[in-house]
Amino acid sequence: MLKKYKYLDNRVIKTKRLLKNSFLQLLQEEKFEDISITSIVERARISRVTFYNHYDNKENLLNEIIDDVITDFVNAYREPYQTLKNFSIKDVKTTSLLVFDHVYRNATFYKAIVRSHLLTFFSSQLTLAIKKLGKTDFRVSDSKINHDLFTTYLAYAIPGLIIEWVKDGMKYSPIYMSEQPMSIMIMSPERIKKLP
């Protein structure tokens, strides 16, 4: 009996993966409003009935994709410090930063979203997730720095770097992209000079 359920679970996972991939491919070609259930199922090579067994509409499919990506993003974001009791930004090795690896692994999703009008919606969801992490996971020890403003800064800076990286065709490696925010955060203001 257990084998039967495992088989069914694997079928559900495979079917959902086909639907998500089909949807993301279509999103790179068409506007969200123009994507039909028919085009999704035809590309995925499954029936409409199967689609409706899993989703009520394409909005539910999109929301599940975004939820999955944000959950994976949060896990990647937390990875360098998750097991540490205390840490400082200076202690974090750039090779342990997995946010840009996450983006690279999910390039199909990010490319589709960045090229669509859904970017604002996704960006706001990602910003909220990062703000929440900033409020629950970090403490700023400098009393001159407002914690809410610090989390807002992080919440907008990281998605901004991600979006520009994707728009530029991911021309830099994930490691290089991980090094940049770390270098920016620990850089002293004296190193910023006005152009002549």
Image: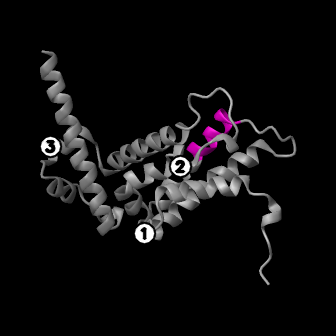
Q: Is residue 131 magenta?
A: yes
Which portion, as a residue range, is magenta? Answer: 128-138
Residue 117 tag number: none
Residue placed at 19% from the left, 33% from the top? 10
Q: Which of 71 and 76 is in front in this view?
A: 76
Q: Is residue 186 toward the left or the right of residue 107 in the image?
A: right
Amino acid at dot 2: Leu
Name the residue tied to disc 2: 126
Q: Which of marks 1 and 2 is in front?
A: 1
Label 1 vs label 2: CA separation?
A: 20 Å
Label whose residue precedes the other's in the sequence (1 or 2) = 2
Residue bearing mark 3: 49
The answer to whether the residues at label 3 and label 2 have Cβ atoms under 8 Å apart is no
Q: Position of residue 125 (x, y in %)?
A: 52, 48
Give the percent coordinates (x, y) of residue 184: 68, 58
Q: Which amino acid does label 3 sit on?
A: Val
Residue at x 14% of width, y 43% of height: 49
